Amino acid sequence: MKGRVALITGASKGLGRAIAAAFRERGAVLLTPAHSELDLASNTSIDSYLSGLAGGVDILINNAGINPLGSAADYSDDDLKALMQVNLAAPMRLLRGVLPLMCAKKYGRIVNISSVWSLVAKPRRFAYSTVKAAINGMTRAAAVECAKDGILVNAVAPGYVNTELTRKNNSESDILAISRAIPMQRLAEPSEIAAVVAFLASGQNTYITGQTIFADGGYTCL
């Protein structure tokens, strides 16, 4: 991907930071806008940022997201609205915005970050699981539409990843219990997920499109 322009959302921490590092190592030209430059909660901000991409991008990584927890019975309208905007509407808007120049170039790679919770569920993931399943559907639909123009669209669905947020939200005993529930007996390192994203977003990927790759240590096989 040397010289390819890659737009990565949510690149300041966690998985996004690891993806940015992997792309940098592979020679990509990175666009990693701060919240002040690109606010995914605002369609006006998204459109303004896209209008400034005169040369377009070769690679789009829809990574940023939020995860307000709540059961089906108590999930608030405000939480649902925010989740739908940031985790679904914004990625769709960004994808739509970068497509015209990708089509003109007859080249593009788009990777959407999904989640194991798009396939399996646990308590208080009612809206999050729903929206991530929608991301998988968006990925398939966009792949079918874009394939003729040399644009490959895929999703990566991580399981439990050893990030600051995971450590913040779970005690050491929680982490141990989670690890025991994963066939590989450990959490993923961010760099391992980033390597999958990097392959799908690179010129080495020439035929994989419309797929959701579950990088979860076998968690969803149970």
Image (cartoon, rainbow, N blue to C red):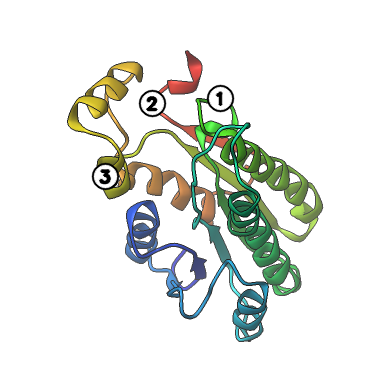
176, above or below 189, in the image: above
Would you name the residue on which mark 1 appears? 120
Q: Is residue 88 visible?
A: yes
Q: Amino acid at mark 3?
A: Lys
Q: Is residue 185 visible?
A: no
Specify whether 2 is left or right of 200. left
Residue 83 pos. (x, y %) = 59, 52
Specify whether 215 is left or right of 210. left
Crowding around mark 2 (Cα neighbors within 10 Å: few <14, some 14 to 19, many 20+) is: some
Q: Residue at x 39, y 43 (%)?
A: 193
Q: Amino acid at mark 1?
A: Val
How far apart marks 3 and 1 lie (CA) works out to 23 Å
Marks 3 and 2: in contact by CB < 8 Å? no
The numbered mark at residue 168 is 3
**Which residue ends up furthest to the top in the rendered image?**
222
Q: Secondary structure at mark 3?
A: helix
